[in-house]
Amino acid sequence: MLEIILVLAIGLAPPLLSFIFLRRAEARAQMRLRSAIRAAEQRQLQRLLALPAEHRYIEGMGSLIGDFTCRFNARSAHIRCAVNPFGPCKECPYYEPISSFTDPS
């Protein structure tokens, strides 16, 4: 009888140990994943807070510069305007407001 119990214990030990180690590895992986997500969120927040005043963050597009009410805005993080790429937007001679609605008559 003792031999049968010993054989069963030896036969069940590897799957049981494997199950225990698998659960520990999954818990460690979840912890590392949560840590990585938190670190990425903190880096994104730091980037947003470190933007100069003329930069604006737009979801899906990223950080953009320039005046968005101007028709010539390049909608880029590197170039302000298609006409005046490096100049300031204030008092720009090329400023043209975007007309969202044009009267057909």
Image: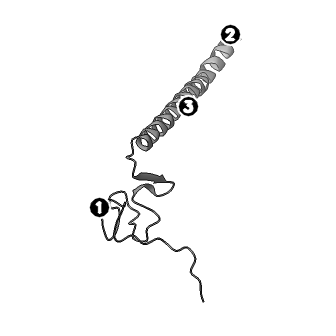
User: What is the residue that sits farthest to the right in this orientation?
Assistant: 1
Q: Position of residue 5 (x, y in %)?
A: 68, 14
Of badges 1 and 3, the one in the foreground is: 1
Residue at x-position 29% and y-position 61%: 87
Residue 26 is tagged as 3
Q: Position of residue 102 (x, y in %)?
A: 56, 80
Residue 17 found in image quarter: top right
Judged left or right of residue 82, residue 11 is right
Q: How many marks?
A: 3
Q: Residues within 10 Å of mark 3 (few under 14, many from 20)?
A: few
Location of residue 90 with respect to 37 vertically, above or below: below
Q: Which mark is residue 2?
A: 2
Tag shown at residue 24:
none
> Which of the two discs, 2 and 1, labels the residue nearer the N terminus?
2
Q: CA distance from mark 2 to mark 1?
A: 89 Å
Give the class, few, some or many, for how many residues have Cα within 10 Å of label 2's Cα (few <14, many ≥20): few
Which of label 3 and label 2 is nearer to you? 3
- Which quadrant is the N terminus positioned in? top right
The residue located at (38%, 61%) in the rendering is 76
* Secondary structure type for disc 1: loop
**On the rendered structure, is 39 left or right of 16?**
left
Labelled disc at residue 87: 1
